[in-house]
Image (tube, rainbow, N blue to C red):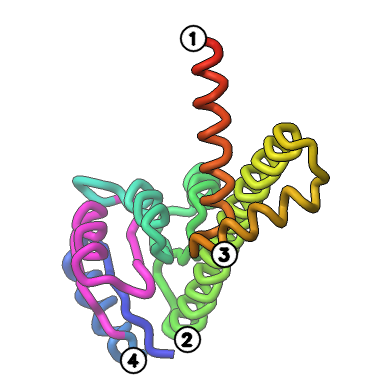
């Protein structure tokens, strides 16, 4: 697996050593930067499969940067000399995909990063599924409300109201949910007009 990485490490010698090590392991380096803000900017500009961040850095620390990067869909791994409970807890609550304590071991670096990348992909897939479920539930709610309006207005059965909406969607070449929204909007307009009479 050839992953494209961004490395954020404020110590120039460690950053250079880490970049060389990662290249030897056949990782591609998109950018090597010295702080969290620069890591975010590099991610926006160059993209990456994974962002490797030191925790303690000037301008913006690695935890704050990871939080922002994860919101943008990035897979993030912290590489740090700090393993205090509060840092680990914050990393966990942010949702980082991996945590490596310095000094890193060469034989562990590749598998740790590959597993973290796979975890990041699973996290993003799960987020997409949750969003899709929420969207489907909202769509069903809109369609149900429109169906109820038609049933009440025309004294028809639920199945018949649904068929009317389906027919209108097919005839107008529109999604069913758009037809439902139109029915709801029209009903709301009528209700408001009657209220203001």
Question: Which x, y percent locates residue 191?
Answer: 57, 21
Which label is found at residue 26?
A: 4
**Earlier residue among tags 3 and 4:** 4
Q: Point out the frontmost of discs 3 and 2.
A: 3
Q: CA distance from mark 2 to mark 4?
A: 13 Å
Q: Residue drawn 37% across and 57% down?
A: 72
Residue tagged by mark 1? 196
Kindly check if marks 3 and 4 are in contact, taking CB atoms under 8 A apart as contact: no
Decide if residue 133 is on the left or right side of residue 120: right
Query: Can you identify the residue that label 3 sits on?
Result: 170
Write the start and end of the magenta stretch as one range. Answer: 28-56
Q: Which residue is at a point 21% across and 48% down the rendered structure image?
A: 58
SS of the residue under disc 2 = helix
**Do labels 3 and 2 touch, CB within 8 Å?**
no
In the image, residue 66 lies in the stretch drawn in magenta: no
Residue 135 placed where, x, y %?
58, 52
Reply yes or no: does residue 53 show up in magenta. yes
Using the image, determine if residue 37 lies above or below residue 99.
above
Q: Earlier in the sequence, mark 2 or mark 4?
A: 4
Who's the residue at 28% across and 69% down the image?
7
Query: Which residue is identified by label 2?
Result: 107
Labels 3 and 1: the sequence-earlier one: 3
């Amino acid at each position: 697996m050839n992953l494209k990485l961004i490395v954020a490490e404020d110590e120039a010698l460690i950053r250079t050593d880490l970049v060389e090590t990662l290249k030897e392991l056949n990782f591609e380096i998109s950018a090597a930067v010295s702080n969290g803000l620069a890591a975010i900017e590099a991610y926006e500009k160059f993209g990456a499969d994974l962002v490797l961040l030191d925790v303690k850095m000037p301008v913006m620390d690695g935890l704050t940067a990871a939080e922002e990067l994860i919101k943008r869909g990035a897979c993030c791994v912290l590489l740090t000399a700090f393993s205090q409970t509060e840092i680990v807890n914050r990393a966990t609550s942010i949702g980082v995909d991996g945590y490596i304590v310095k000094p890193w071991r060469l034989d562990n670096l590749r598998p740790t990063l590959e597993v973290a990348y796979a975890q990041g992909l699973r996290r993003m897939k799960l987020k997409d599924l949750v969003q899709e479920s929420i969207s489907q539930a909202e769509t069903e709610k809109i369609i149900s409300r429109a169906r109820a309006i038609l049933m009440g207005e025309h004294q028809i059965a639920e199945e018949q109201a649904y068929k009317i909406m389906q027919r209108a969607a097919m005839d107008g070449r529109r999604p069913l949910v758009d037809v439902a929204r139109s029915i709801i909007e029209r009903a709301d307009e009528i209700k408001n007009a009657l209220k203001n009479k």
